[in-house]
Image (cartoon, rainbow, N blue to C red):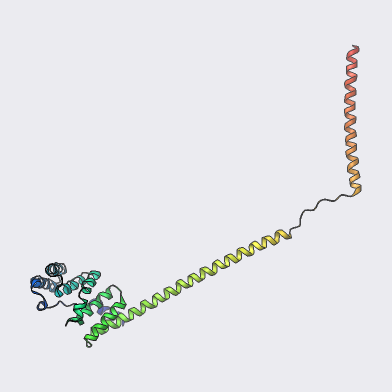
């Protein structure tokens, strides 16, 4: 169903030019020229003619309405929407209201503004209930709006889920860091502290005796060296 509706929306459009009879006298010639170019599908030439008509009368309903038709076929959907928006008040109260809202719905579909499209086709059906194309496009726009809303909701849920997962991971990392820090502190406290080496009285006496013996040996060596020097001097004196 969705593919069939999309085909109707994109391939068949009820953008119909307004008849010259509704035009004011100043812009009649340019609008008629634009309509001839429009029927030949010369969209750019028709665009120029309708704009010339608007230079003469910027409030011309026919020129604005048909310019929107031409812009639509040139895929200038934003400009087409603006052109139609200028006619909203006048078109709503005119005999062209159903066509106006239908065309507004088509523009909204092209811009993927499905909420506006639903409302526009709804207004078209209120004014022309037997318009099957408006009904099919209304159903299509409503379905696309539901899909868009579901997609946005899923994106919001996924974004929230990712945020929650990131927060959980941060909490886990913080807890792991704290555990590692506590373990390091416990290990430092549990390591045995170095103790001063204790010696027995006997070991102390032996060390003292060794030191004294070393000192006596050193003293004896010094005394011998002194005696040798003195003896050498005495021999030198006698000689």
Q: Position of residue 34 (x, y in %)?
A: 12, 71
Q: Is residue 18 left or right of residue 113?
A: left
Q: Is residue 155 left or right of residue 69?
A: right
Q: Position of residue 14 (x, y in %)?
A: 20, 79
**Would you identify the image quadrant in which residue 230 lies?**
top right
Give the quadrant of the C terminus: top right
**Would you identify the image quadrant in which residue 190 lies?**
bottom right
Looking at this view, is 33 or 24 the one in front?
Answer: 24
Looking at this view, is 223 or 115 the one in front?
Answer: 115
Q: Residue at x 22, y 85 (%)?
A: 127
Give the quadrant of the N terminus: bottom left
Q: Residue at x 27, y 75 (%)?
A: 108
In the figure, 46 relative to 131: above or below?
A: above
Inspect this view and state whether residue 78 appears.
Answer: yes
Q: Residue at x 88, y 39 (%)?
A: 211
In the figure, 179 relative to 7: above or below?
A: above
Toward the top, the furthest residue is: 239
Toward the bottom, the furthest residue is: 130
Inspect this view and state whether residue 14 appears.
Answer: no
In the figure, 231 relative to 135: above or below?
A: above
Q: Is residue 199 left or right of residue 98?
A: right
**Would you identify the image quadrant in which residue 87 lies?**
bottom left
Q: Position of residue 161 (x, y in %)?
A: 48, 73
Q: Residue at x 51, y 68 (%)?
A: 166
Could you tell me how many numbered marks the image carries?
Answer: 0
Q: Position of residue 144 (x, y in %)?
A: 33, 78
């Amino acid at each position: 169903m969705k593919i069939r509706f999309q085909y109707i929306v994109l391939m068949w459009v009820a953008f119909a030019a307004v008849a010259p009879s509704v035009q004011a006298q100043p812009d009649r010639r340019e609008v008629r020229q634009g309509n001839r170019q429009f029927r030949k599908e010369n969209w750019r030439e028709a665009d120029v003619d309708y704009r010339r008509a608007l230079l003469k009368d910027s409030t011309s309903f026919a020129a604005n309405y048909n310019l929107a038709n031409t812009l639509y076929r040139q895929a200038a959907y934003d400009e087409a929407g603006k052109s139609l928006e200028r006619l909203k008040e006048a078109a709503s109260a005119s005999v062209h209201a159903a066509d106006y809202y239908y065309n507004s719905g088509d523009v909204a579909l092209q811009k993927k503004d499905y909420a506006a499209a639903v409302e526009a086709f709804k207004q078209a059906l209120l004014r022309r209930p037997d318009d099957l194309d408006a009904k099919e496009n209304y159903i299509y726009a409503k379905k696309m709006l539901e899909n868009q809303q579901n997609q946005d909701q899923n994106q919001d849920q996924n974004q929230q889920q990712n945020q929650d997962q990131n927060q959980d991971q941060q909490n886990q990392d913080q807890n792991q860091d704290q555990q590692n820090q506590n373990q390091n502190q416990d290990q430092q406290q549990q390591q045995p502290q170095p103790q001063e080496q204790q010696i027995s009285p006997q070991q102390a006496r032996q060390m003292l005796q060794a030191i004294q013996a070393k000192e006596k040996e050193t003293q004896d060596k010094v005394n011998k060296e002194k005696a040798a020097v003195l003896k050498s001097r005495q021999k030198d004196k006698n000689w």
